[in-house]
Each structure stands twice: as C-alpha cells, then as structure tokens.
Amino acid sequence: MNKKLVAVAVAGVLAAPLAAEAQTANVTLYGRLNLTMEAVSGRAVDPNIPATGNQIQNRTVYRVSSNSSRLGVRGSEALGGGLSAIFQIESNVSADTGGGLLGTRETFVGLQGPWGTFKVGNFLAPYDDIHPIFGNVPTLTTSILSTAALWAQASQSKGNGGFDARLGNSIRYDSPNMKGFVGSFQLSSLDASSGQGGVTYGNQATQQRHAYVMSMGAYYTNGPFKGGVAYENNQKVRGQGLDDWALSAAANWNFGFMKLGGVYERLDYDTATGNLKRDFWGVSATVPVGPGELYGFYGNAGDGKGNAANGTTIGQLVKGGGTGASQWEISYTYALSKRTLAYTGFVQTRNDQNAFYNFNINPYNVAPDANASGFVVGLVHFF
C-alpha cells in the first residue's frame, strides 16, 4: 500500500475532525529498523560480588541491540508565496525488546521558505551535525560502532556534561543553502524548576534557576569537500553559575577511491575548584571495496587538564594524568538494496589507567584502566 495513503489513514484515526485538511497536505509515514547481534567484552565491576572482595572481572556479553530504530510521520502544506508549513512526529522503537516512546525523537512544527527553515519542538542541535562529517556514516553513526564514544562526551546526558543530545523546548533556524554554505542556530530552554528539557536536577528548592543551551554551526559543501565548525554553550545546566562550552571542527574530502575525514574538539567545564578541559582529535577513512564500503576510524581524547583539582570528574572526563583514552574501529557495509543494509565491524575503546570511557550507544560500563571491545553484525531496513 502506498505509504502516503497509509499515513493519511493513520492521521484520520488519530484526528478524525482534521481528516479533510490532512488529505490536502503532503504526509509521509516513514521508519527505520536497525538491529545488531553483538559480542561485547571488558573488565567490569560485578555488583553481585561483595565490596570486600574482588569486584573486577572479565566477561563477554552476547546480546541483540536496537540502534536508533524509529517510526515517524512527516509532512508539509504549501501556504503560498513559496512558504510551507512543516511538521514531524518521530517515535523511538525498542525493536530488540518491544515497545517504544511516542514523539521522543525529532518532533516539531515549523515554517520553511526561501529565507530558510524555522522550527519549534524537540530535536538535535547544530553541534550534532559535526558528527556525520567525520563519523561512521556507512553504519549510520549509531550502535556500539558510534564514533562519538569520546567525542562530545556523547554517552552522557546534558545534566552530566554531554554535548550531543536531543533537546526539548527548542527553537532552531537553518539558513538556505548559499553557494554551499549553511548556518544554523538553536536555543533550548531548560526550566530547572520543572526539570523540563531532559535534564534532571537535584533539590529544586535550592536550585531554582533558568538553564539554557545555545548551539550554532556553520557548514560548507563544495564538490568533494565538506567541512564545518560548531559551538555549544550550556548555561547553568549542571548547576547554578556553571558555564560549560564545546567547540568542534571537522572536514572530509572525497577523492573517489577514498574519503578522508578529520575532527578536533575542545571541551571546557566550570567546576567548584576551577575549569576542567579536554582536547580530542580523530581521523577516518571510507573506501569502496567490492560492492560495499570499508570504514576505519581512530580517535584520541587527552587527559583532563585545567586548574580544577585533580580527580575532579564531569561525566567520564577526569582531571589528572592517565585519564585519556582512544577509540578505534573498522567496519564493512553492504547495500542489499536501496532500502536494506547489512554491516559488520569491530570497535574498541582503550582507557588509560585512570579513565573509564565506554561505548556511546548501548554502553558496556567498564572499570578504570579497562578496555571496552565489541564485535557486531547488523541489519537495517528503511521504509
């Protein structure tokens, strides 16, 4: 059955009084199922062993994981004069265990015209647009193969120092494409008194504050080259008077026989004893091999530095020596059709003696000075 007709039927059931109007709009039902079979291993803390005993053990876990699987409805309506109303409702689908959450992914309403796009709702910030430039696009920048295990502290929530998050209470503007250049700006209000915006606060009586996130990016595409720079500022998100920011730049060049990418990032956090900083860099290569694409990545996160006290911790970033980590991976993706992908890969996050970074998506929590390793076979279908 035609997807548009199915979407109209669904809209009619949910909102019968609006059926006539819905049929005049361009409405599409879409989705993605991305499932992986994984073997992950590392040295982990075993909660079943008493604290007085040896809590660190090596173990391998075999599991099936759902990786950003989704179901959504999107559409537009021409308003005249080149102006269109746009909307999207995108829901998470837990394809590995069943269930899901309505409207928790990219969900918004907005306007689009020759001047650009304006939208209001819940969505990723411009800072996240850096990731596909250097990241593992053949495997959709998700699963344990995600190259954001170290970059942006992406495994961490906003309230715990992460800079790669979907934010509610957001307004965003994206400029039109001007000879390859696109600029983006987003402002997200996180009401500390109500805990909105996906951030969990402590005692509300002592933490009445208005927190917000400002994110902006500039991106340029010209033939085989693509590059971008993004900045994000978290004001009072982790606490009163705390100002955190991240700056990231990435680029790639497609030579035909190979696409090379690179990224640099600086994270900077306010703490009670001073600022905590970290530098990160990474390189990637995508090579057509046979009917598919071979992808390789190496990234390195330096030690936590700055004038904060040694041992100060924000998310997985720790101040002091031996707190850095690296991530490397290799994967191969094969398109079975225009809508179905199969892929396989191996990834490892290698921690220094005082570091405990893990995977970004579906993490395997590790003890300090331990590596998180994983072998994956995945299948994706788009509809």
Image: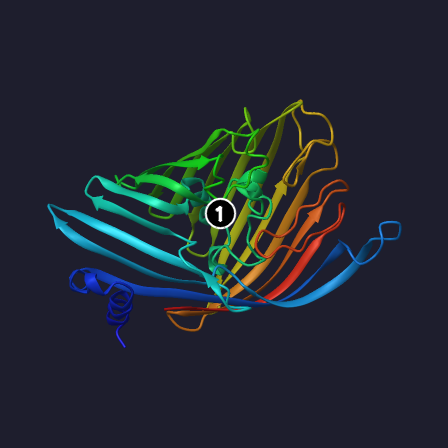
Quadrant position of the N terminus in the picture:
bottom left
17, above or below 129, in the image:
below
Q: Given the image, on which type of amino acid does mark 1 rest?
A: Phe
Q: Going by the picture, which residue comes out furthest to the right?
A: 52
Q: Is residue 163 left or right of residue 75?
A: right
- Residue closer to the observer: 17 or 98: 17
The quadrant holding residue 302 is top right
Few, some or many residues within 10 Å of mark 1 (<14, 14–19, 20+): many
Whether residue 289 can be seen here: no
Residue 157 is situated, as x and y percent measured from the top left of the image, at: 55, 44
173, above or below 344, in the image:
above
Residue 120 is situated, as x and y percent measured from the top left of the image, at: 32, 43
Q: Is residue 120 left or right of residue 343?
A: left
176, above or below 75, in the image:
above
Residue 337 is situated, as x and y percent measured from the top left of the image, at: 40, 73
- Residue closer to the observer: 28 or 217: 28
Q: Going by the picture, which residue comes out furthest to the bottom?
A: 1
The quadrant holding residue 215 is top left
Whether residue 169 can be seen here: yes
**Residue that mark 1 sits on:** 134
1, above or below 285, in the image:
below
Q: Going by the picture, which residue comes out furthest to the front?
A: 205
Residue 274 is situated, as x and y percent measured from the top left of the image, at: 64, 22
The colour scheme of the drawn protein is rainbow
Quadrant position of the C terminus in the picture:
bottom left
Which type of secondary structure does the marked residue at label 1 adopt?
helix
